[in-house]
Every structure is written in structure tokens, then in C-alpha cells.
Image (cartoon, rainbow, N blue to C red):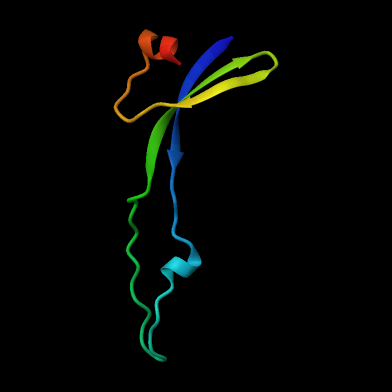
Amino acid sequence: MTGDENWVHHYDPENKSQSMEYCHKGSAAPKKFKTKTSAGKVMLTVFQKSEGVVLTNFLEEGATVNSKCYSET
């Protein structure tokens, strides 16, 4: 069995219905500002055998990957 860890980025964009806003005919559309409040990254640890993936684990924020972390997982 082998284990590996990697950063996984995630982003939850707002969907079309969430970004819709009413405006009068002929008026300019409101400006949209790009924000990344929902963007982030988490540490993913994957354990696998020759048959395939055995376990995936997302680490809690602030946790470090060390021998204690591996033994608890």
C-alpha cells in the first residue's frame, strides 16, 4: 500500500439564477466584481494498492501531514 498527499483546489461559482438581477429596459447592466470568497484549497491524502484506491481523506484546516497523521488515518 502506498500513500500520497496533494493540494486540491475548489471553487463554487454562483449559478446563473443567483447572478440574475432585475434592471429597467434601456438602463445599463450592473457591474459584477470578481471575488473568490468560495475559492480555497485543502490537502487530500490518498492510499492505494495495485487494485486501486483504498482510502481518500481530506485533512482539516491547519493540520499537518506527519507520522501521527498517517497512523491516525
Q: Can you say whether 12 is above or below 7 in the image? A: below
Image position of 48 (left or right of 7): right
Q: Position of residue 72 (x, y in %)?
A: 42, 13
The residue positioned farthest toward the left in the image shown: 62
User: For the view shown, which residue lies furthest in the front direction?
Assistant: 72
Instruction: Judge left or right: residue 60 versus residue 47.
Output: left
Q: In the rendered image, which quarter is residue 24 located in?
A: bottom left
Q: Position of residue 59 (x, y in %)?
A: 40, 26
- Tell me which corner region of the image, top left, top right, bottom left or bottom right, holds residue 60: top left
The image shows a total of numbered marks equal to 0
Query: Foreground residue, 54 or 39?
Result: 54
**Residue at the spot 42% in from the left edge and 68% down from the top edge:** 19
Q: Quadrant of the C terminus?
A: top left
Quadrant hosting residue 30: bottom left
Which residue is most to the right?
51
**Residue 27, how many percent across, how many down?**
36, 88
Report the residue at 48% width, 62% height from top: 15
The answer to whether residue 65 is left or right of residue 49 is left
At horizontal 43% and vertical 47% (from top left) the residue drawn is 11
Name which residue lies at 62% across and 21% down: 53
Quadrant where the N terminus lies?
Answer: top right
38 shown above or below 65: below
Q: Nearer the viewer, residue 46 or 36?
A: 46
Residue 51 percent coordinates (x, y): 70, 16
